[in-house]
Amino acid sequence: MRLEGDIVTPAGVVRGHLDSVDKRIAAVSGAPIDAARAGEGGRPILLPGFIDTHVHGGGGRDTMEGGDAITTIARRHARHGTTALLATTMTAPVGEIEAALKALGGVCRERAPQSARVLGVHLEGPYINPDRLGAQPAHAIVATLEEVLRLNDFAPIRVLTIAPEMTGHLALIGPLRDAGIRVQIGHSAGGYDDGVAALHAGAAGFTHLFNAMTSLHHREPGMVGAALAHGRHAELIPDLLHVHPGAIRVALRCIPGLFCVTDSTAAAGMPDGEYRLGEYTVQKCLGGVRLADGTLAGSALTMDQALRNLVQVLGLDLVDAARRVSTAAADYLGLADRGRLAAGAWADVVVMDAALNLQRVFVESEEIDVNADA
């Protein structure tokens, strides 16, 4: 396969062509240009496929449904440029989480046609603080290493959100890290010192920074203060509802490995209406997703819109924006062969026009039908 255009690489934008062989990029060739010139003259812009580590649903389906829901979800997000994702669970009774993970195991092993690669699971709960549930159901419990590892046997847990201030959680961080699970701090009522202690124990990042955690105050810096002062990685939802653009700019200056996620629900890629989020019914309206009491409950964001928000609202240049929706997440997950357009990487490519409207998507060289109805 050969694609021509303005190619966004980790080093900058190259005007030339990209060749792939056997699902991998064989070569990127061309001459460097200024990122501001990308797409001029109607040239297509080639970006690395987006990586989303926080996906609850999409296309009207929810991860916790089990069955074939994740295939529908992965196909819907692929049509918006997401080429790899983590299927994300909700806080629920452990038996329900176990059933969801059993359904996810096979999909993690083999990618379905016309869908994003499901890299594994983000277990967001039940090991969170019941005082910081956000839109999570009230089934929070204290984690044990044995239980997490048992769940990991059903489907690979790549990321686990915990509240480090809960009894025994701090001591679990090191063993979980050693088992290959990245521990993220989130849904936490802990303060600054709790966050610093968790990072020292081996926590890797923060779950949807600013949301469902103690905020920054100049005399009580909170969990947000710990993230901004000491964090190297954090996920953030750039739908412009969860976090004000000014706060996003603060995080971009403070956290070198900040990456974007959607926290998407079944409402992603769907019209306004009612949808499922775990055991809850949520309402999509005016671009947001909320519980009946008005609480934000995940999002309807897709990663192509996240990129547009970064460039068109926040003013990031295209190379940095691509890093925040692709490369930074790949690096965080330890994937040197995803999230970048470079020789040897998987041929995961998003093609956009100068206005950053999505034109084509390739997942491991397979072209996705971005106009499919179902």
Image (spheres, rainbow, N blue to C red):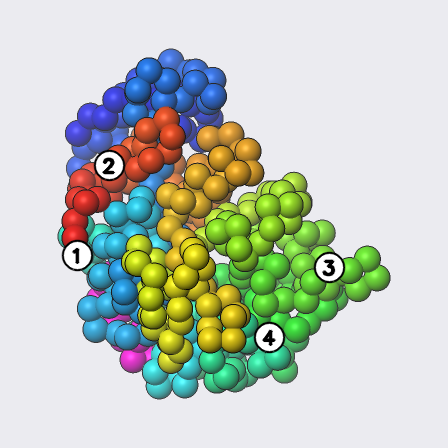
Residue with the mark numbered 4:
132
Residue type highlighted by circle 2: Arg
Question: Earlier along the polypeptide chain: callout 3 or callout 1?
Answer: 3
Q: Are marks 1 and 2 in contact (CB under 8 Å)?
A: no
104 in the magenta segment:
yes
Main SS of the magenta part reads helix
Q: Which residues are magenta?
A: 98-109
Which residue lies under the disc numbered 3? 216
Element type where label 2 sits in the image = strand
Q: Is residue 259 left or right of residue 201?
A: left
**Which of pointers 3 and 1 indicates the residue nearer the eye?**
1
Q: Disc 3 marks which amino acid?
A: Leu
Identify the mark nearer the N-term, 4 or 2: 4
Residue identified by numbered label 1: 374
- As drawn, 9 above or below 162: above
Residue corresponding to mark 2: 360
Q: Which numbered disc, 3 or 4, marks the residue that appears first in the sequence?
A: 4
Label 3: few (<14), some (14–19) or many (≥20) C-alpha neighbours in 10 Å: some
Which image quadrant: the N terminus?
top left
